[in-house]
Amino acid sequence: MIKKRIIPCLDVKDGRVVKGIQFKGLRDVGDPVELAKRYNDEGADELIFLDVSATERGHELMLEVIEKTAEVLFIPLGIGGGIRTAEDVGRLLNAGADKVSINSAALKRPELIREAAERYGSQCIALSVDAKWEEEERDWFCYTHGGRKRTDVRALDWVQEAERLGAGEILLTSMDTDGMKQGFDHELLLAVKQRVSVPVIASGGAGNAEHFVNLFTETDVSAGLAASIFHNKEVSIHEVKELSKRNGVAVRET
Amino acid sequence: MIAIVDYGLGNIANVRRALEYLGYQVLLTKDPEELRQADGLVLPGVGHFGDAMRKLEADGLIPILTELKDEKPFVGICLGMQLLYEGSEEGNVDGLGFLPGKIERIRTSLPVPHLGWNQLNSENETLREDVYFIHSYKAVPDEYTVATAQYGGEEVVAIVQKGNLIGIQFHPEKSGDAGLAILDQAMKGGFR
């Protein structure tokens, strides 16, 4: 049986991890390679770096970070942010990434998913979606630019289209629950799982270990992602796994 | 010195990094003499079975691989494992034929590929670890099977060994410490 995955996500800007990270005894808390190792030791099943650099130089530094991380990290490494072309995807994979997630560029030009999937295989192409509920329309809509720009694309239609184009996984962030620490957005996740059969990574809303257990027992998503609660040591990956096991959720033993 | 068979297919870099992390010296090559001199061989591969066989053939690698298959640890990883068999439903082509049997499509109601962390079943207790799989085709368990994994009622070969010839279906280079230990053991002669 496939194990449910617990995935920490690190925001990387110009080669450095941004946002507060609280790991004891780390010489340099902003070093993505050090943090990647630490999360590996804690039992993370996969790691995602989100490149939030605003410049070309920043994206180049990301490649260096991936290369250095791949020398010491032997679990799957996903990269999101700043991907515009199939060539960008190729560069990230060559540097040592196992998967890339595409958001804005795919909304702008959906064929990018097909091109990247045909060239590198669906298993390494994820669609990243930032979705927000709109009460008047009674539906979820996709946002770009880190959640700042609303599009007219309906999230449920979009994930279905992306699967058809060859996306091998959906990284789904609910902007309604993100940062609230009240649990994942089950309503959105269940609706998306109705539309696609590829694995879904749930993101946005985790505040404690129970939220992961609820996620895995109430929806059939494949993975739960969180950033700040892991970085701030509010919850450890170990704790999430122990509680999951006690509640009958199969997780990877480390 | 470990030689990774370089036939232009798949993400060889991460297998190389894992071997180097384990302390091996690694050479990427398709030169027969260098392959002969290596202490162990790794046949990597991701992608399509038919494409891979055509590339091995185009690079003239099949005779040297056949010569060396019993000589020293010879480890096929992922598609590289599948190539060791007689053939595959994927593209309906012949494989290297070093192991008996044919590679089949995974048939289950669950999503294919079989993707993610799954547990190994084995008589060897030290192998009962969670490891990372990505594949749509599978080998069928037989007398050479060392470990398997269950996926939606299907039993897929996860590790196979016949003499010095070893196949690993999952990605040991992406399976954390457990995967690295299995890769190391494979390069040191395997599991029997």
Image (spheres, rainbow, N blue to C red):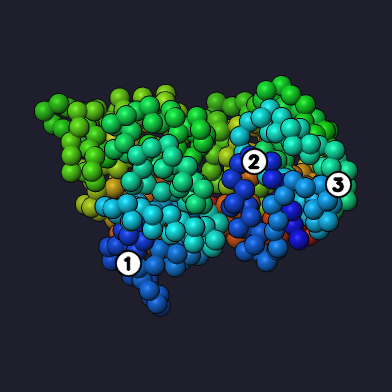
Q: Amino acid at mark 3?
A: Leu
**Front residue (pair B177, A65):** A65
Please tell me whether mark 2 sits on a helix, a strand or a loop. loop
A24 sits left or right of B153 in the view: left
Q: Position of residue A26 (x, y in %)?
A: 40, 75
Q: Amino acid at mark 2?
A: Gly
Viewer-nearest of discs 2 and 3:
2
- Residue positioned 43% across, 59% down in the render: A65
Q: Amino acid at mark 1?
A: Ile
Q: Position of residue B42 (x, y in %)?
A: 73, 49
Query: Quadrant of the rendered structure where residue A154 is?
Result: top left
Residue occupied by mark 3? B68
Verify CB contact (< 8 Å) between mark 2 and mark 3: no
Residue occupied by mark 1? A21
Which quadrant of the rendered structure holds the N terminus of chain A? Answer: top right
Q: Label 2 is found on which chain of the structure?
A: B
Residue occupied by mark 2? B8
Q: Are marks 2 and 3 on the same chain?
A: yes
